[in-house]
Image: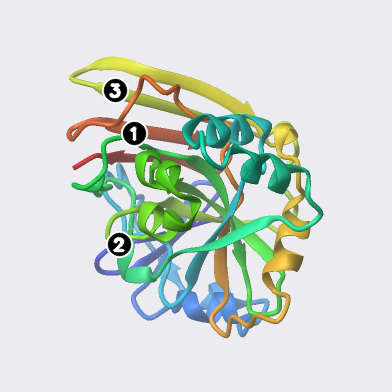
Amino acid sequence: MRLYRTDNATLLEREGQWLESSSFSIDELFRGNLAADWTDRFTPAAAVVGLETSLPPIESQEVWAAGVTYFRSREARMEESDKEADVYDRVYTAERPELFFKSTPHRVVGHGEPVVIRTDSTWDVPEPELALAIDCSGHIFGYTIGNDMSSRSIEGENPLYLPQAKIYDGSCALGPCLYLSEEPLPPSTEISIRITRDGTTMLDGQTSLAALKRQPEELVSYLFRENSFPAGCYLLTGTGIVPGAEFTLNSGDVVTITIEPIGTLENTVR
């Protein structure tokens, strides 16, 4: 099942059938308060075509992120930080993962909405990631696509600048929907990204969850150590696709990220 948010309603799609509710709370879903027959709250909706723009599937949830969980991410972080390169090498092999706060709900944008590059940054990239939907008890119950926008010039100058490189308005995109599943996604699940500029493809990359060094359950277990999330949370699991040092995003670029069976998240850069 896939859950979409629009300006007026929450939409649930299951095997081509649409249900609609104007009162359904995503917070309830993350708090684990819904009964098994929660779909009875919905009334049949007309088939929805397009959804060119949708709100992110978030209400009160914090968004957190894991770093250096793919070997390619380790390499990229070391390339951008000539002064502190060993920091990223050590966290890749360490027992404890890198976890950091990414976003509050009001900074998150949805499918079709613009993501932002900082005006005080000279080197900016998208980071296509699988996002875990985690309820208040630490249970993974769904997935969405995340774009963890990042200023490599700011983080590369000093790792302590990570919050400024990562946390700002429009720095996180989630969507196009929340894919609800009790079954974990298989390691063969592919993540792809395409960046186009004036109709020309600037980057076309792929990876899979098989390249993820740490299992999602391990990341969640560390996130919930001495930490509570009354409204649940999202956790971005890291990126295995990082553009080379010669590439930086420009305003007007279109970033398209696809993870099946979730769908495609597309955002224009401003």
Closer to the camera in the image, 111 or 62: 62
Q: Name the disc covering residue 196, or none.
A: 3
Under mark 1, the amino acid is: Val
Which of the marked residues, 3 or 2, is nearer the chain's N terminus? 2
**Residue 61 position (above or below residue 90):** below
Q: Pointer 2: what residue? A: 6
Closer to the camera in the image, 14 or 208: 208
Q: Position of residue 255 (x, y in %)?
A: 34, 33
Q: Name the disc covering residue 198, or none.
A: none
Q: Is 64 on the left or on the right of 223, as rendered?
A: left
Residue under the image location 32 percent in, 35 percent down: 123
Under mark 2, the amino acid is: Thr
Q: Disc 2 on helix, strand or loop?
A: loop
| Residue that sits furthest to the right in the current view | 95
Q: Is 36 on the left or on the right of 117, as rendered?
A: right
Mark 3 vs mark 2, foreground winner is: 3
Q: Pointer 1: what residue? A: 255
